[in-house]
Amino acid sequence: MTEETNQMTSALLYLDDVSVSFDGFKAINGLSLTIEKGEMRAIIGPNGAGKTTMMDIITGKTRPDTGDVLFEGKMDLTQHDETEIAQAGIGRKFQKPTVFESQTVRENLELALAGNRGVWASLFYRESEEEAAKIASILETVRLTHRANELASDLSHGQKQWLEIGMLLAQDPKLLLVDEPVAGMTDAETVETAKLLREISKTHSVIVVEHDMGFIRDLGVKVTVLAEGAVLAEGSLDHVSAHPDVIESYLGR
Amino acid sequence: MISAFLFRGLAGRIAWVAAAIALIGILVPLSNLFLTPEHALYVPDYIVSLFGKYLTYALLALTLDLVWGYCGILSLGHGAFFALGGYAMGMYLMRQIGSRGVYGDPILPDFMVFLNWKELPWYWYGFDQFWFAALMVLAVPGLLAFVFGWFAFRSRVTGVYLSIITQAMTYALLLAFFRNDMGFGGNNGLTDFKDILGYTLQEPSTRAGLFAAAAFALCLALIISSAIVRSKFGKVLLATRDAESRARFLGYRVEHVKLFVFTLSAMMAGIAGALYVPLVGIINPGEFAPANSIEVVIWTAVGGRGTLIGPIVGAITVNLGKSWFTAQFPEYWLFVLGGLFVAVTLFMPRGILGTLSDATGKLKSLGSGKATALVQDPADASELRKEGEAS
Ligand SMILES: Nc1ncnc2c1ncn2[C@@H]1O[C@H](COP(=O)(O)OP(=O)(O)O)[C@@H](O)[C@H]1O
Ligand SMILES: [Mg+2]
């Protein structure tokens, strides 16, 4: 019992027996998951397994019917809305790249940059030199320096994915939720993205959802397999790939 | 801090337009008062009144642009804020009449005497003071917008549903102000004003002063709005307009963003109404008519939303057209207005100003040759990128 309490408080993110259903359909069904501080975790699973819904629950978009969701052992995420959860330090990249299309690449990063989000603070905001330098370095990291002053709508699909990762870097959250970051990317871009995420994981905790097995192998982290809204297997990629249930429900297809 | 903030609003073409409005605000009254009617540059009295009215419409359209063009809140009830500001001013003007009314009651306005009321309702207290009325011009529309927005934005009412409830709001006020027992003069509204701050309203010099005040208010509102949309808050407004839920996941409190800009916009609309009433000499419940609010949307769309200058241009052009048309073919105006809206939506979705700046943008890129065209083509741009990486 004490052990469990200890674990609850030391874990960065703790989901216990979480369920949610949409019109009677159980999208998440008794899901339990623990992410430690500094950990990067890959989540795989067939389409409709509930991966995106799990992120919706963690970020306050969807309220679970039952179960506990704790951040840093103390914040009950089911009792907070998207804004509060984002301010508490959980950032998110969407499955479909979602950037502010009518603003420039640089403005997108400025909006994401950590800082006071209040109305007055934004009205009288002046960018400091450190902030400008930080944006410049993020632009370098996500290779968008040469397009900094172009509208985000003019970027290619892959570049939008990278801009969104850049926005996560600017936001500098404690936990990053990254939903299918390499969808629609070329092989070269996929390799680069894995490199970038490994770099990011040195200083942040990360949850990555992906279908691309090569990409998951490149990440080289612990894998959780989700199916029908619950955890099917957990461990190294080789370990879970050998798991008979996993082969049947996912890899075998 | 405030002056540095406002200074930022004076960037680019906003500075020129603000200067032009200020100049008109000075030169038109001077010409009207000091030139003889024979002079080529003389501006006659009726033009001063008519264009003064247009300036207040332009201000109203500008306030709508701030919420619709920049934050995506299509308010179909902005006429209500305008009318409330107008009523606050009308109540002051009413009490200035004093014993010069038909019934000669020193305190009660004529319509109250007519209704056999014995004393002034409490909500008419204080309106004999200009400062109090001026405060109410801001506070009443501001408070209504705040309370309305508080509930609507917190419940995440957006899009068509929000537009419909703003329309319902102005319609409810229309019905309320029509009632005699509300104490705002029923369907006759407030009229027969005599003077403002001691100046006779019929005097050309008073009208010229009101014109100057309207131009000054429009100029200031333009600079403030421009400073707002150029600040980081302006970027948050666009983010809210384009991807509200994304903005939430970045940690922005979207409902506060909307509430702030909606309330500020309503207060500025109240000022427009307050300047309108002494210029036209009457305020009645008709100003709450849902169609009025829709007209403001049309002015803004025609001029070009999300440009600040466009709505000013749109309000003045459409109303010039309206004045001419209603004189020539009064029965066709509504059809023309509806047709104009459809035509603009279909063929000029960015309005007069947006279309103009598209055209000048194209001219410029033609002038600077192939370089711009290259960057605009994504395939070529990725070529450029590879070159950049190689070097
Ligand atoms: N808001 C919603 N309303 C109804 N059904 C939903 C909703 N969100 C997700 N679902 C359903 O839940 C299931 C899991 O979806 P999702 O989490 O997107 O899967 P994944 O991301 O693993 O592909 C799907 O069957 C989907 O149709
Ligand atoms: Mg998904």
Image: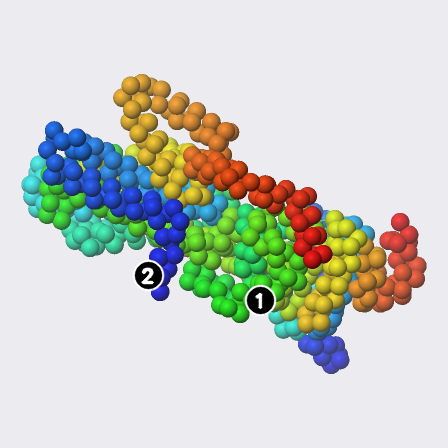
Task: Name the residue carrying label 2.
Answer: B3
Asked whether the viewer can see residue B148, the reply is no
Q: Quadrant of residue B212?
A: top left
Q: Position of residue B284 (x, y in %)?
A: 25, 36
Q: Please, is residue A236 above or below residue B340 in the view?
A: below
In percent of the image, x 41 and y 47: which residue is there?
Answer: B66
Q: Position of residue B34 (x, y in %)?
A: 11, 39
Q: Is mark 2 within 8 Å of ligand 1?
A: no
User: In the rendered structure, the residue with mark 2 lies on which chain?
Assistant: B
Q: Position of residue A46 (x, y in %)?
A: 81, 52
Estimate the spatial distance between the alpha carbons at disc 2 and disc 1, rounded to whole Å: 28 Å
In percent of the image, x 23 and y 52: which residue is there?
Answer: B134
Please give the label number shown on residue A134: 1
In percent of the image, x 57 and y 50: which residue is there?
Answer: A150
Name the secondary structure under disc 2: helix
Name the foreground residue: B358 vs A112: B358
Tag 1: residue type?
A: Lys
Quarter of the picture containing the C terminus of chain B is bottom right
Name the foreground residue: A72 vs B115: A72
Name the secondary structure under disc 1: helix
Q: Quadrant of residue B4?
A: bottom left
In percent of the image, x 24 and y 41: which residue is there?
Answer: B24
Residue A131 left/right relative to B29? right
Name the foreground residue: A35 vs B143: A35
Q: Position of residue A222 (x, y in %)?
A: 81, 67
- Give the residue furthest to the bottom: A2
**Count of numbered badges drawn on the protein:** 2
Q: Please, is residue B318 above or below residue B265 in the view?
A: above
Q: Quadrant of residue A58?
A: bottom right
User: In the rendered structure, the residue with mark 1 lies on which chain?
Assistant: A
Tag 2: residue type?
A: Ser
